[in-house]
Amino acid sequence: MFIIESEIPINLLTFEPDALKAIGHSTNIVAISFIKKLIETVGRSFEMQWFTERELSASGFGNHRIQYLAGRFCVKKAVFQILGVEYNQDCYWLDLEVQRLPTGQPAILLDGKCQEIAVALGITKWLVSISHVSSYATASAIAL
């Protein structure tokens, strides 16, 4: 069973290819067991270093919480790859927040160096998709 947190519908009748230019695309996948082990080994410091307070407060409890955090972890890695930076070097995990819109779709909020790089690259919009099952989480990010 797949849990899909968002789908980005594209209406082909109103889609204008010249209106948006894809600047980058990246996908990531992570084993839930990897994130679970990090949380068990490093504990709260791992969470505080890689996730914002808002991300942590929305994460819930139990196994779903670990899947939720793993999905956000994948999004952050995908965005860093598009920005062309090494995480923990040019940008920090907390400079990027994955938010949930009222529609349920994930959205990207950049701050600090990440925002500066995105502006320099001409990125004005992000399309993000997150999915997870009990053993894996995956995310895709497209920068426009």
Image (spheres, rainbow, N blue to C red):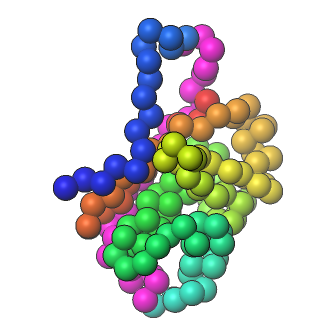
Residue at x 42%, y 28% (from the top left corner): 9
Horizontal arrangement in the rendering, residue 84 relative to residue 72 (left or right): right
Q: In this rendering, is residue 10 above or below 60?
A: above
Rendered-image quadrant of the N terminus = bottom left
Quadrant placement of the C terminus: top right
Q: Is residue 13 magenta?
A: no
Question: Magenta stretch: residue 27 in it?
Answer: yes
Q: Residue at x 66, y 72 (%)?
A: 53
Q: Residue 59's x, y, as percent? A: 50, 70
In the image, the segment drawn in magenta is 17-40
Q: Looking at the rendering, which quadrant does residue 112 occupy? A: bottom right
Residue toward you, 17 or 27: 17
Taking the spot 57% from the left edge, 87% from the top edge, the residue there is 44
Of 130 and 76, nearer the camera is 130
> In the picture shown, does residue 48 fall above or below 9?
below
Q: Position of residue 27 (x, y in %)?
A: 43, 46
Give residue 71's position: percent from left, percent from top: 44, 60
- At horizontal 63% and vertical 14% (from top left) the residue drawn is 19
Residue 71 falls left or right of residue 124:
left
Q: Is residue 81 visible?
A: no
Is residue 39 placed above or below 99 in the rendered structure? below
